[in-house]
Image (cartoon, grey):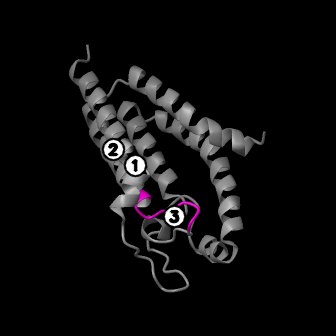
Amino acid sequence: MSYSLLAKRLRLPLGFILSGAFLVLARPQPGGLALGGGIALVGVLVRAWASGHIMKNDRLATTGPYAHTRNPLYFGSFLISAGFALAAHWSLLLLVAGFFALIYVPTMERERANIAGRFPEAYKAYAANVPMFVPRLTPWRGADGASAGSFSSALYMKHGEWKAALGYLAALLVLALKLRYAA
């Protein structure tokens, strides 16, 4: 089994294990919780926006957040992780960065190869203009000059992205309770 396939298979189980350990060990402070919670909320919103634009394997997503980064779902996940790490202690950002480098970069590369094979001509122009992870500030307009596709709430629901919002609220509640009842 290749490393990229192993990374793809391990990303969710490891993410849940690390999230659980984080919630148990976290000792939030008010300022860190507010800042980190805000960053994580931006991540939830990015993921929601992206899920309403992607039609996996049917067409190349280049609208909405996909006009800024080729991987807005993973970028949103990074913001969620980084935000909650910051809520616990700034040094945990190093753990988040390492996790994303070891697990998500190979996964993104594997997906890049898959998408490039499905949409060879369109993907070539897209990849030349839209960064893999860190978003560009202005949206790429594409060959047809369009960058704004309409958000589909049906796609958002189909992809189950509302679960990320519930997870965010649950984690925020746990951290707020830990802060409130800290000894």
Q: Quadrant of the N terminus?
A: top right
Give the residue drawn at x 45%, y 74%: 139
Give the residue drawn at x 64%, y 48%: 107
Identify residue type, mark 3: Thr
3D distance between C-alphas at marks 1 and 3: 18 Å
Q: Which residues are magenta?
A: 51-58
Which numbered marker is on residue 165? 2
Decide which of 86, 163 is in the foreground and name it: 163
Q: Quadrant of the C terminus?
A: top left
3D distance between C-alphas at marks 3 and 2: 21 Å
Q: Earlier in the sequence, mark 3 or mark 2?
A: 3
Q: Earlier in the sequence, mark 1 or mark 3?
A: 3
* 131, above or below 97, in the image: below
Which numbered marker is on residue 161? 1
Which numbered marker is on residue 69? 3
Look at the numbered discs 1 and 2 and tell me whether their residues touch, using CB distance below 8 Å.
yes
* Magenta stretch: includes residue 145: no
